[in-house]
Amino acid sequence: MTKPLVAVQSIEELRARVRAARQAGQRIGCVPTMGALHAGHLSLVEAARRETDFVVLTIFVNPTQFGPNEDFTKYPRPLERDLDLCRSAGVDLVFHPEVGDVYPAPNATYVDVPVVDKVLEGAFRPGHFRGVATIVLKLFNLVLPDAAFFGQKDYQQQLLIKHMVADLNVPVEVRTCPTLRDPDGLAMSSRNVYLSAEERQTALSLSQTLKIAAEMIQRRTAPAEVRAAMKQHLESFAGVKIDYATVADAQTLEEVTELVPQMVALIAARVGTTRLIDNQILTVRAG
Ligand code: PAF
């Protein structure tokens, strides 16, 4: 039988329902999202259901993480469809506040996590991670979850959140769950809906490039050579504009000049007008 789904907009109602669940001895799981849910989000819900007893999914298109020329206004907001998906996925509570509930005007306090917020996404989207860290801390303070679930697709984001939680002693366990892909390799993203059929084909260049990088690193190819091959492959597709395509240390996100134990390949590129990101953890073949 499908569990009843409760969707609330108000902070008071959210707090009351979470408090009741906690008083009933339940562990609270939180899946923060901006809505436009897809199977990737639902896999986070599954992980939350495995680990916790009461799953709160938040839907909030957070204005502070969008730059002035980004897609805040056009970001998809299919609330009814999202609620149906949450119902079938077994979410207990959806919190979908209005901007004014979450950001009282004027909002004077923001969270900066300078350790990994300047490079890669941080360099191309100034202010983005300040917006992410601020809203995630707000959501943690509102939901008070025991554990929160994020996708590896936003690799830098999950790293930043882990730093914030450690630095500010936030009592939340942060879990990173694997990226979900369509059968042809395209990483699932709410922004994929912007792609035309032709652009969607071109977008496969990102996961293909990551595969090339993973194979080269497995064979112990030098990172500079891998980066060159990544760029060359992406550039062979008309309609792809690279922001970055690199191999970095998996913890610091600094570009590596030699093979280190934990590495990650990361790409951000525009396909048409849609900006996509993807990444893959890299392992070196032993011996
Ligand atoms: O990954 C996202 O969807 C957003 O950045 C998040 C974590 C929900 C914060 O707005």
Image: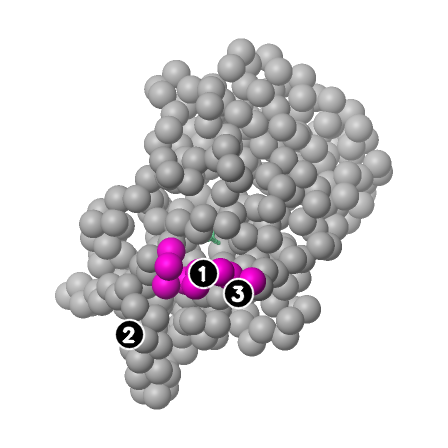
Colour scheme of the rendered structure: one colour
| Residue, disc 1 | 105
Q: Does residue 31 appear to the left or right of 162 in the view shown?
A: left
- As shown in the figure, which amino acid type bears the numbered disc 2? Glu
Mark 2, Cα crowd under 10 Å, few <14 / some 14-19 / many 20+, is few
Q: Does residue 231 appear to the left or right of 161 in the view shown?
A: right
CA gap between label 2 and label 3 equals 19 Å
Of labels 2 and 1, the one closer to you: 1
Q: Secondary structure at mark 3?
A: helix
**Residue 253's x, y, as percent?**
72, 46
**Residue 182's x, y, as percent?**
40, 35
Q: Is residue 240 visible?
A: yes
**Residue 194's x, y, as percent?**
37, 29
Query: Residue 105 lies in magenta, yes or no?
Result: yes
| Among the two numbered marks 3 and 1 on one chain, the one whose residue lies closer to the N terminus | 1
- As shown in the figure, which amino acid type bears the numbered disc 1? Ala
Above or below, 159 against 190 in this view is below
| Among the two numbered marks 2 and 1 on one chain, the one whose residue lies closer to the N terminus | 2
- The structure residue drawn at horizontal position 35% and vertical position 66%, both measured from the top left corner, is 56
Residue behind label 3 places its C-beta within 8 angstroms of ligand 1: no
Mark 1, Cα crowd under 10 Å, few <14 / some 14-19 / many 20+, is few
Asked which quadrant contains residue 254, the reply is top right
What secondary structure prevails in the magenta region? loop
| Residue, disc 3 | 137
| Among the two numbered marks 2 and 3 on one chain, the one whose residue lies closer to the N terminus | 2
- The structure residue drawn at horizontal position 61% and vertical position 33%, both measured from the top left corner, is 267
